Amino acid sequence: MLRAMRNQTVFVNRVWNAPVMRSFHASVVSLAEGKAPKAPAVKDETKVHSVELISDIAEDTGLTKKDVQAVLRSLPAVIAHHVSKGKTVYMNDIGIIKTVDRKGRTFHNPTNGKPVEIGDRKLVKITTAVALRKLVK
């Protein structure tokens, strides 16, 4: 739906019936180019983003959201620091993060059939905790 008000154009969102203000010039240009205004994204209920985690942790612990955000931002760097030194990181009720050595091997390229050699390498392995796996079942 499109309604004009003074030098503004109001698009009424059909999903929520909420007005979205845009400048008249931008609206006319986008309509002239055949572009319709974008509808808001539908929230996916199967995903949890960091903002929601921060809010939940702050509510659960009584810390401020800013403090929780600082901790969550530093966590990957701290884990990477310890894992890069060859240490195993144990996180209660979440899992284990460690490095493993993979032996080199030979495989055949499916495109041309020639053998390709992969050397020895180190990988990061994440194993989920038994308690977490039981919750999922």
Image: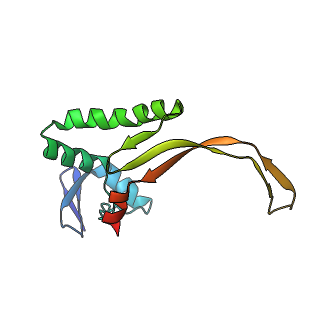
Observer-nearest residue: 73 or 35? 73
> How are the colours assigned in the image?
rainbow
Q: Residue at x 74, y 47 (%)?
A: 104
Query: Quadrant of residue 89 in the image?
Result: top left
Observer-nearest residue: 39 or 27? 39
Image x and y of residue 63, in percent: 15, 36
Q: Residue at x 31, y 56 (%)?
A: 48
Image x and y of residue 3, in percent: 21, 63
Q: Is residue 54 left or right of residue 64?
A: right
Query: Quadrant of residue 30 in the image?
Result: bottom left
Q: Residue at x 49, y 34 (%)?
A: 87
Image x and y of residue 62, in percent: 12, 40
Q: Quadrant of the C terminus?
A: bottom left
Q: Total marks drawn?
A: 0
Image x and y of residue 29, in percent: 39, 54
- From what the image shows, is residue 55 above or below residue 134? above
Observer-nearest residue: 43 or 39? 43
Query: Quadrant of residue 113 in the image?
Result: bottom right
- From what the image shows, is residue 36 above or below residue 98? below
Q: Residue at x 25, y 68 (%)?
A: 1
